[in-house]
Amino acid sequence: MSELVALCFDADASPSIRFAAPQPTDASPPQDRPVALYGWGVGWYPSSERGAAVLKDPTSSGDVAVNDVLRDWNRFRSTVFLCHLRGHQRQRNQEDAQPFVRSYGGRQWIFAHDGDLAPDWTKRLPLPDDPAFEPLGRTDSEHAFCLLLSRFRAAHHRSIADVAPDELRAWMAALNQGGQLNALLTDGEHIAVYRDAGGKGDLYWTRRIPPHASTELSSHGVQIRLDAPQDPNRTCLVFSSVPLSDDAWRATSPGELLILRRGSILWSSAPAHAAASTRFATPDGVLTVGGLVEAGHQSAAAEPLRAPMVSPTQNSAGRTLTVLHETIYDYDQPVERSTHRLLLRPIEDRAQHLLDFSIEIDPETPRNQYEDVFGNEAIGLEIKAPYQHLRITSRATVHVVSAQTLEQRAAHRRHVIPLVWMPWQRQMLSTYLLPHELPESQLQELSEFAMSFVERNDYDLVGTLLDLNETIHRDFEYVSGSTTVATTAFEVYESRRGVCQDFANLMICVARLLHVPARYRMGYIFTGTDYENKIQSDASHAWAELYLPQVGWHGLDPTNGIQVGSNHVRVASGRNYRDATPTSGTIYRGGGTETLTISVRVEEIPPPA
């Protein structure tokens, strides 16, 4: 019996790995006694390069701490780690020990196998007459590995990303007909995980996202710690023959193939994972993620997502919405003088038509209407008479036209990261290219977070931005009242919780670190009547708008993981929350304790019959 373990991080990480050989005790029931460990091996890609490093001991029966052996070597960092633990007593030498490593296609591949093929596997699964794929040892596992690589070569595929997942699954199934096959295959960028079609042997998985409640994973044969000082914010996918912790693990289905990359499941052959799919369109209409052609069920998370608070479907003809926004300030002492700025008027352009707008202010005061430096329609107030109660009520009727998706708008050309701007473009966009003022160490951490999406999507701009938008929705928890206007993007990144303005700020910060101009957009959102969480429609909403070459500004709503469309009413924009807040002001004298009450109601006007 063997045990397989695969770790897939969203960025380079240094897990602590210890292989152990516990001895059974007479007091333990036979089924609970640990299997003695007679060999182990671990493979990884130092600093995510194409060259693999493999460390293995085919005859070990004692405790071995891989991290102790390599603790002084800073090359023990990777996004991919594959481990194989052998639990039977058959003698093995170095060339027969797993995992195996082979060079092909300008990269090194690693393969690990749990199970035994039929005794006549050499006849059932003959290798081509090609010395490039001649096994070094005498095991059925290495034979299967060589056969897989020969099929890649025969089909002129040089990486896992080049082959259609269903085709790779067919190759695995053909090997599976020769005996038991639970397998891990990686080219350093993607990991293919296959479960035996007959259900012989198990493969479980879990996805760990920060902040980690527990960083320890262990079984009878291996202990893994994810607590390296430089890795507190890493997301990790873990696959193992046995669950490595007491929390919930998911069992893969017999015959299932999964494709992993950078902490996410990109594709799964299991229909249960199709609900979590995220589809990215390319200019020729082929659906891809990270270079993988969709031939089955593509999934960015392969796990149930938070129920969307907004319908992902858009009304193709657009929709007409009414917005009632009421803001009430109450003070325990009279305010003798104050000034205010109101940004409540929805914008008008080809995608949004303002049919009616009115604003009531109590106490009534002279108004000064003007356009601010960001192009927002602002109203300035100066109240000189004492008051203890200020009510501001705005009403708007807006027709929102259904916009094209980012994939459609950018379909004429594939944009890649990094973006190159002309000097005059950079000058005009400089306001939206400057990252938030944060310590350099925090910006460096956020840059690594940003690059994990870039790497996962093969530097494709549209795929990276849509993946980031969906990941913030999936991995970050919406918790009302958990942050303040002073909460930084890095604090949200660490805590993985916040509200719409926090998620917008995080996406803006990460986009700017990728040299993508980004701005903060305040507005309203229509959630309909079929959603349990209506808190977003009970106040103003916030999202990010990104500027892409030959596309212009395009809105992405990371709170809901969708693109901005006919559910969103756009009002004001700016560099950040302070530039676009609906109501702001200064009290020069008086006021005392302030009580603020905000109420927003967004409703749809049904189209005429």
Image (cartoon, rainbow, N blue to C red):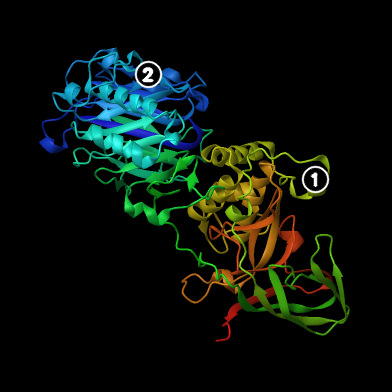
Reading the image, the residue beneath label 1 is: 425
- Left or right of 195 in this view: 25: left
When the figure is inspected, residue 191 is found, relative to residue 56, above or below; the finding is: below
The quadrant in which the C terminus is found is bottom right
Which tag, 2 or 1, sits closer to the chain's start? 2
User: The disc labelled 1 sits on which kind of residue?
Assistant: Gln
When the figure is inspected, residue 188 is found, relative to residue 293, above or below; the finding is: above
- Provide the secondary structure element on which disc 2 rests: strand
- Left or right of 118 in this view: 513: right
The image position of residue 112, as x and y in percent, is: 31, 27
| Mark pair 2, 1: CA separation | 50 Å
Nearer to the camera, 471 or 209: 471
User: Residue 55 — which label?
Assistant: 2
Say if residue 358 shows up in the picture: yes
From the image, state whether disc 2 or disc 1 is nearer to you.
1
User: Residue 21 — which label?
Assistant: none
The image position of residue 197, as x and y in percent, is: 22, 41
The image position of residue 489, as x and y in percent, is: 63, 49
